[in-house]
Image (cartoon, rainbow, N blue to C red):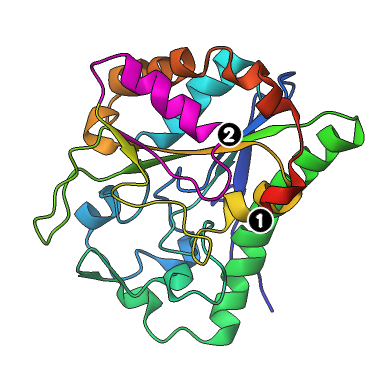
Amino acid sequence: MAGLLTAADGPPFHIVNPGGKADCLLICDHASRRIPERLGDLGLDAPHLEEHIAWDIGAEAMTRWLAEWLDAPAVVGGFSRLVVDLNRFLDDPGAFVEVSDLIAIPGNRQLSDQAKVLRIEALYRPYHAAITDRLGEALDKGRVPTLISIHTMTERLRDGHSRPQEVTLCWARDGRLAVPLMAALRARGDVQVGDNVPYGLDLGEDFSVPEHAMRRGLPHLQIEVRQDLVGDDAGAHRWAGILLDAMAGLLASPAATAIEHHWT
């Protein structure tokens, strides 16, 4: 069976700042809107592939800034979540979404098992293997890495529902880093902060943080920033700076340097 990716497609993920020395790993599941050449445009009009349904706008830029400033490595997904969602369990319908924010995805309709396997083997497994390898290397050296997952959210859905939250912390069970980070962001006085609003860390749906961090008892953060605030380089730079300032000291705290198996 031929693979999904061609030489023109590039790799399924990128490692940013691979030599980073900080005891943390950044990940960006939904960094890209690219579609593998063999899948065409999934039947979508070009404007839809620019929208939030295809990727987390601004998330990769923030991840790259934070990786540089924290001196931390980052694993960045290389293709659109419309191909396979890297932050979903593979038996979740959202892994190969057929409708997103009221937009039908024709190229995902009634996918065969073989078509799904092609996407999983080409994109999903390599990305998650890279995260597993990076965390394992740190743990083998006696270090406890903090996993930081960067996402962005649309400011408005097609049903008219809007999101006033500028940044949201998504967490469940283990709030040892999320709760103080929320407090630090709120203390600024100029940021609207959501606590699992408009959505939180869903242990039955979200995959990356539960699988790679919570299962191991590792400290972690899952952060969502509103896309209209980070849609250009200046906005992404500004918000990466806001997050960095709020994390100051937090990543060196005892909570961020311990494994907590009772949270798993």
In the picture, the disc for residue 235 is none
In the picture, the disc for residue 211 is 1
Amino acid on which the number 1 mark rests in the picture: Glu
Q: Residue 247 location, x and y as percent? A: 51, 19
Q: Residue 216 location, x and y as percent? A: 75, 49
Tell me if residue 7 can be seen.
Answer: no
Q: Nearer the viewer, residue 168 or 53?
A: 168
Q: CA distance from mark 2 to mark 1?
A: 18 Å
Question: In the figure, residue 194 lies in which quadrant?
Answer: top left
Is tag 2's residue or tag 1's residue first in the polypeptide sequence? Answer: 2
Question: In the figure, residue 76 lies in which quadrant?
Answer: top right
In the figure, is residue 167 to the left or right of 212? left
Which residue is under mark 2?
Answer: 176
Q: How many marks?
A: 2
Within 10 angstroms of label 1, few (less than 14), some, or many (20 or more) residues? some
Q: Residue 132 location, x and y as percent? A: 75, 48
Please state the extent of the stretch shown in magenta in the rendering.
167-191
Amino acid on which the number 2 mark rests in the picture: Arg
Q: Is residue 32 above or below residue 160?
A: above
Is disc 2 placed on a helix, strand or loop?
loop
Q: Nearer the viewer, mark 2 or mark 1?
A: 2
The quadrant in which the C terminus is found is: bottom right
Which residue appears at 26% of the width and 22% of the height? Answer: 191
